[in-house]
Image: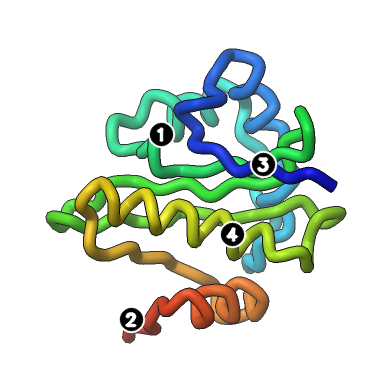
Amino acid sequence: MDVDLQPFAEVDSTEFRHKWHELFEVLRKYVPRLEPPTPFSYEQFEEMFVVDPDFLWDISQVARDKEKLIGFTYLYRSDVEAELFQAQTAVHRDYRGRGIAKALKARSAKRAIEAGYRTVRADNDTRNAPMLAINARLGYKGSPE
């Protein structure tokens, strides 16, 4: 397995966006939630991510095994100065347990620091023990509601 991590900005194309949408629809089913997710059309997906001015293309990261998109983490500017919001980190089930999610989060944090950001916030479901463990290893601190 030869997994590459790259910023979204370096791989962006119409083809990439469609692959990202397809993977997004698969991976969001894995996220603990009370109700199954409602599928997003490509147009809804594009509106949520592609055209959002706060989406950080240079900091958000994708993981690929050759040309196959297998995971991602994406971040947005926050309303708070020098702070980002990490919206989702997810890796296809066939590739889990190999440190890819941790590497995605670590790489995005490094790029965020290089860009002058000081804080990255994430919102995780308390039932998502694997992601909470990754966050703890990377130094994320829990915060009260």
In whole angstroms, how far apart are the C-alphas of marks 3 and 2?
36 Å
Instruction: Note whether 31 is above or below 2 in the view shown.
Output: below
Mark seen at residue 103: 4
- The residue under label 3 is 4
Give how far apart the Cα atoms at labels 2 and 1 are: 29 Å
How far separated are the C-alphas under marks 1 and 4? 17 Å
Q: Residue 57's mark? A: 1
Residue denoted by label 2 = 145
Residue at (50, 70) in percent of width and height: 124
**Pick the front one: 49 or 105:** 105
Judge depth for marks 2 and 1 and give the one in front.
1
Looking at the image, residue 93 sits to the left or right of residue 141; the answer is right
Within the image, what quadrant is residue 24 found in? top right
Q: Rounded to the nearest whole Å, what is the CA distance between mark 4 and mark 2?
A: 27 Å
Closer to the camera, 81 or 61? 61
State which tag comes first along the sequence, 3 or 4: 3
Residue 12 marker: none
Question: In the drawing, does residue 81 fall left or right of residue 107?
Answer: left
Image height of 31 relative to 125, above or below: above
